Image: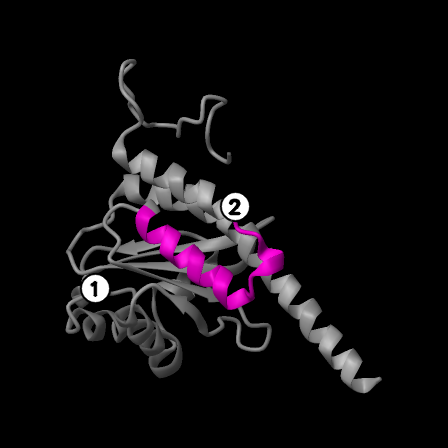
């Protein structure tokens, strides 16, 4: 497992010798096991992304909702392809379609984790932040999905609470994002291959 020692423990987690892992680590490990069990050959791209979003909600402390976005070769940042909750889809439509500004765009283009605990007054995204804050969502954590330093997409994590995502949440999110990037990329390649097969069959 990425980011763990041979015993399966996540670095930085304090575990008493007579106890199991802390609850946040246990949630992460369970999400990673389910992520590894995804059989992308039998699931479509949309289904894989939906599973990734669902697993991320449990893996990242403080998350109320998660969206998964892929990059577009034409636009740089692609459309939202999966959301764990309708409010996430609404927020990310504001980000990508209405304003073209927000944490996922920053995370994907700059290939780094970004977060805010007070979106309403966030200077990094002066149009996006206040608009989302008025919807009652105050914290965001965006994690790039990286493969060999190349971003294939991003995970957007939102919370209705202020200052919901601390260093620990970011650390656990990054541990989840590493294998999630592989799963998403494999599903994307499979979807492209299936589309090409259909086009070739139609041409023949």
Q: Nearer the viewer, mark 2 or mark 1?
A: 2
Q: Residue at x 44, y 42 (%)?
A: 32
- Up the image or down, 102 lies above or below 187; here it is below
Q: Residue at x 51, y 34 (%)?
A: 1
Element assignment for label 2: loop
Residue extending farthest front: 42
- Up the image or down, 71 lies above or below 162; here it is below
Q: Residue at x 60, y 72 (%)?
A: 73
Q: Is residue 202 magenta?
A: no
**Mark linked to residue 1:** none
Q: Which residues are magenta?
A: 38-58
- From the top left corner, tell me how far across and down residue 111 is, in percent: 48, 55
Name the residue beneath numbered marker 2. 37
Tell me the quarter of the picture where residue 200 sits: bottom right
- From the top left corner, tell me how far across and down residue 130 is, in percent: 19, 72
Element assignment for label 1: helix
Residue closer to the observer: 151 or 24: 24
- Asked if labels 1 and 2 touch by Cβ distance under 8 angstroms, the answer is no
- How many marks overall? 2
Q: Is residue 14 left or right of residue 151?
A: left
Name the residue beneath numbered marker 1. 119
């Amino acid at each position: 497992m990425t980011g763990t020692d041979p015993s399966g423990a996540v670095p930085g987690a304090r575990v008493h010798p007579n106890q199991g892992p802390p609850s946040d680590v246990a949630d992460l490990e369970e999400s990673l096991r389910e992520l590894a069990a995804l059989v992308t050959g039998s699931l479509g791209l949309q289904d894989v992304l939906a599973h990734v979003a669902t697993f991320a909600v449990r893996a990242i402390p403080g998350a109320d909702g998660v969206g998964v976005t892929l990059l577009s070769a034409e636009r740089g940042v692609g459309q939202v392809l999966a959301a764990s909750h309708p409010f996430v889809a609404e927020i990310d439509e504001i980000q990508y379609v209405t304003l073209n500004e927000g944490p996922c765009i920053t995370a994907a283009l700059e290939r780094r984790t970004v977060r805010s605990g007070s979106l309403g007054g966030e200077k990094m995204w002066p149009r996006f932040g206040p608009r989302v804050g008025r919807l009652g969502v105050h914290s965001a954590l965006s994690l790039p999905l990286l493969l060999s330093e190349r971003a294939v997409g991003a995970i957007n994590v939102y919370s209705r609470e202020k200052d919901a995502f601390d260093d620990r949440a970011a650390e656990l999110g990054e541990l989840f994002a590493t294998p999630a990037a592989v799963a998403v990329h494999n599903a994307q390649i499979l979807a492209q291959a299936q589309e090409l097969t259909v086009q070739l069959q139609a041409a023949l």
